[in-house]
Amino acid sequence: MIESNGYFVNNSQIYKDTNLIENPKDKEILVEILFCGLCRTDLHVIDQEIPFTKYPVIPGHQIVGKIIQKGQNSTSQIGKKVGIYWLYSTCQKCQYCNQGRENLCDKANFTGCTVHGGFQQYIKINEEYVVDIPDFYEDHEIAPLLCAGIIGYRSLSLIEECETIGIYGFGSAGHIISQIAIWQGKKILAFIKKGDTKTAQLAENLGCKVYYSNQIINHKHQGSIIFAPSGKLLKIALLNTTKGGTVVCGGIHMSDIPPLKYQWIWNEKTIKSVANVTRQDANNFFQIIQKIYQKDRKKIKIDTDVYPIENITQVIQEYRKGKTGKSVVFKLK
Ligand SMILES: [Zn+2]
Ligand SMILES: [Zn+2]
C-alpha cells in the first residue's frame, strides 16, 4: 500500500487528504508525479458540471511523472518519464473499443474525474495508457500538451482537409493547434473576445489573423473549431463557415446553444462534438510534435506558470478571474 497525499474535491470544496494506493500488479505501473497541469475541465469537475464525475475525486489530468514501481507483467522501465492524460482506461471489448473509438467506451475511466488524478504524489495506471513524452522539452512544458494539445489535435484532425480554419476561443488548445496548423501550411483565423488585447497579440505573433469573437466575416473559412465553452458561438461559427464545411465543438462542456436556423446549416454543413481522446490521438499528437522538431527544430510551445501544489486553492481563484494568463502547472515534487 502506498500513501499518496493529494487534493480532493467534494461538494465544490477542495481539501487535503491521503489516498491509499495498492501496489501495482499485472501491467500496472506506479508513477511518481512531478508536474500536473490545471485545465478548465478541472474547474468543471470542481463546479460539478460534468455529470459522470465520481466524487470525492482528486482532479488533474495532465500528468508528467516517473515510473517507480511496476506489476509482474509490465515491460515498462523503472525511472522512465511518461505522460498521463484524460483517458485512464477502457474496456477493450465493446463495439466502440473494437472500432477504434475507445474515447466513446461506456466503461472508460477518465483521469481526475472518474478516478483520482494528478493533484497528488503518486498515481497507478495500466502501462498501456501512458504516452511517451519527447525529451526536448522541460518536464513542466509537457503538462499542457497532455490535454489542450491532444484534444486540440483530435479537433484539428476532424477538419484535416481544410486550408483555412477559424478558431473560436484562443486558450491553450487554440494556441497549440494553430502552431501545428500553420506549420502544416494552413491559414488560421482567431476569433477573440473584444478587449482581450493580450490574447489577440499572442495570436497575431503566431501568424493568425485576428477577429472579434462575434464578428461575421466576408471571406469565410472552411472549418471551425470552437474551444470557448459558449453555445452562442455556434451561430457565428456556422455563418463564417463555407458550404460543406465542418464546425467542431472541442470542449467537454458548453453553455446551451440558442435555437439554430436551418438556413445556417443548409448547404451540407456539419456540426460535430469532440468527446475525450483515444490513445491513438495521444500518440499521433506527440508524433507530429516530434516531426516538427526534427524537421525544423521548432518546438510547439505554450507558456507556463509553475506553482507549488500547496497553493492550489489560491491559484484556482486567480485562474477563475483570468489573472494567470499563461497555462498553469502545479509542481508536485
Ligand atoms: Zn469499451
Ligand atoms: Zn483538460
Image (cartoon, helix red, strand yellow):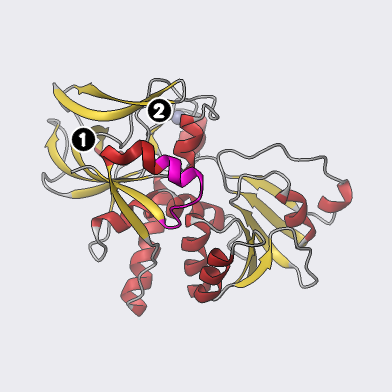
| Numbered badge on residue 157 | none
Q: Give residue 189's position: percent from left, percent from top.
A: 64, 68
**Coordinates of residue 42 in the picture (x, y in percent):** 44, 37
* Cβ at disc 2 under 8 Å from ligand 1: yes
Residue name at image x 21 percent, y 29 percent: 5
Q: Residues within 10 Å of mark 1 (few under 14, many from 20)?
A: many
Task: State the mark number for residue 91.
Answer: 2
Measuring from the top left, give residue 154's x and y in whole percent.
51, 52
User: Which image quadrant shows ligand 1?
Assistant: top left
**On the image, which quarter does residue 275 sit in?**
top right
Nearer the observer: mark 1 or 2; the answer is: 1
Q: Would residue 25 be seen by someone viewing this image from the given angle?
A: no
- Between 161 and 109, the residue placed more toward the observer is 109
- Residue to which mark 1 is pinned: 121
Q: What residue type is labelled 1?
A: Gln
Tell me the quarter of the image containing the N terminus.
top left
Front one among 198 and 103: 198
Q: Residue at x 64, y 51 (%)?
A: 248
Label whose residue precedes the other's in the sequence (1 or 2): 2
Q: Is residue 203 part of the magenta span, yes or no?
A: no
Range of magenta residues: 316-326
Q: Is residue 177 left or right of residue 131?
A: right
Residue at 24% of width from left, 23% of height from top? 19
Determine the secondary structure under disc 2: loop
SS for dot 1:
loop
Left or right: residue 227 versus residue 326 is right
Q: How crowded is mark 2: few (under 14 residues within 10 Å), some or many (20 or more)?
A: some
- The Cα atoms of the two marked residues, 1 and 2, are separated by 26 Å
Which residue is drawn at the image coordinates 61% and 59% (left, top)? 159
Query: For the residue marked with disc 2, what is the amino acid?
Result: Cys
Q: Find out whether the residues at labels 1 and 2 contact each other: C-beta distance under 8 Å.
A: no
